[in-house]
Amino acid sequence: MKVKLFQQDIIWGDPEANRKHLDEMLEENQGADLYVFPEMFTTGFATMEDATVEESDGPVLDWMKAKAKQLNAAVAGSVALKTGAKCANRLFFVTPEGEVSRYDKRHLFYYGGEGTKFEPGHERVVVNFRGVRFLLLICYDLRFPVWIRNRDDYDAILVVANWPDARALAWNTLLQARAIENQCYVLGCNRVGEDPACRYTGFAKVVNPYGEIVACAPDHEEAVVSAELDIAFQRAYAKNFPVLENADAFKLL
C-alpha cells in the first residue's frame, strides 16, 4: 500500500484556506492509496476560547469525500468539531466509496487546555482499508501504550498530530517505540509552522515494525512523505517472532 503524509503548515483558524491549500498540495502529489493530514488540519490546535472550530462536519466531510473519490484513495485527518456544549477532536477516515470512520481523541492534552473545551472519546477504532488494518490515534494518545497495545487487530498505527518542537525528541522516540513494541508500521503525520502558542518541527515519518525509519520529512518546512507499506512482511515478522503472545494482560475499557 502506498501512503502519503502531508506535513502541512496550517493557516490559523481558516478552514476554507486550509482546504484550498491542500487542494494545491494534492494536485502535485498523487498516486497513493492513502493520504494523511495532520491533527486539526482545517484550523490549527483550537483549544483557546476564541479559536475557530468547525461548527458542523458537513463542509469538511464533503471536501474529504470529494477528494477520496477523485483520487481513488482514502483520506484521513482530524478536525476540531463543535458537538454540543463542547467539542470533539475527531479523526475522519474517508474511503473512495464515501464510507466514513470516526475516532474521537481518547487522551486530551490537558496541559495545553484541550480538556476544558473538548470531550474525550472512549472507543478504540480500527479501520480495514484495502486489506490493511489501521489503528486510529491523535497526538497525545501516542504516550499511552496500554491503550495502543496491539491485540492482533491491526497492522499499522495512523497517528495525526500538532506536536510542538519543544518535545520533538519524544515524538521521534515514541513513534519508533510504538512500532517496535506492537510489531507494526507507524504513520506519524505532524504539522509545521506556528500558532499563537507553539512552533512545530514536523518530522512526519513512516516507521517499520523493526523501528527503522522508512521515510521522514525535513524539519520546519512543508513536505510530503511517501512510503510503501509491505504488509506481507509485517505479518510474517509478527508470526515468526510472536512477541505479543507473551504480552501482559491488562484490564481495558
Image (tube, rainbow, N blue to C red):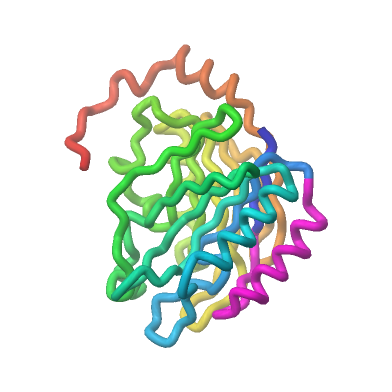
Position in image of residue 201 (x %, y %): 58, 65
As for residue 166 lying within the magenta part, the answer is: no
- Please state if 96 lies on the left or on the right of 79 as rendered: right
In this rendering, the answer to whether 4 lies above or below 185 is: below
Q: In screen coordinates, is 149 left or right of 224?
A: left
Q: Is residue 130 above or below residue 90?
A: above
**Residue 233: where, in percent of width, then height?**
59, 21
Who is closer to the viewer here, 65 or 77? 65
Please state the horizontal and vertical placement of residue 243, each as a whole percent of the image: 37, 21
Q: Magenta region: which residues?
A: 7-30
Q: Residue at x 45, y 63 (%)?
A: 167
Q: Is residue 89 left or right of residue 200?
A: left
Q: Residue at x 78, y 48 (%)?
A: 30
Q: Is residue 4 visible?
A: yes
Total marks placed: 0
Quarter-of-image position of residue 64: bottom right
Looking at this rendering, what residue extends furthest in the left direction? 251
Q: Residue at x 56, y 35 (%)?
A: 129
Residue at image position (41%, 32%) is 182
Check the picture and name the quadrant holding the N terminus: top right
Seen as rendered, the residue at the extreme bottom is 50
Residue 165 on image: x %, y %: 52, 67
Image vertical order of residue 20 relative to residue 150, above or below: below
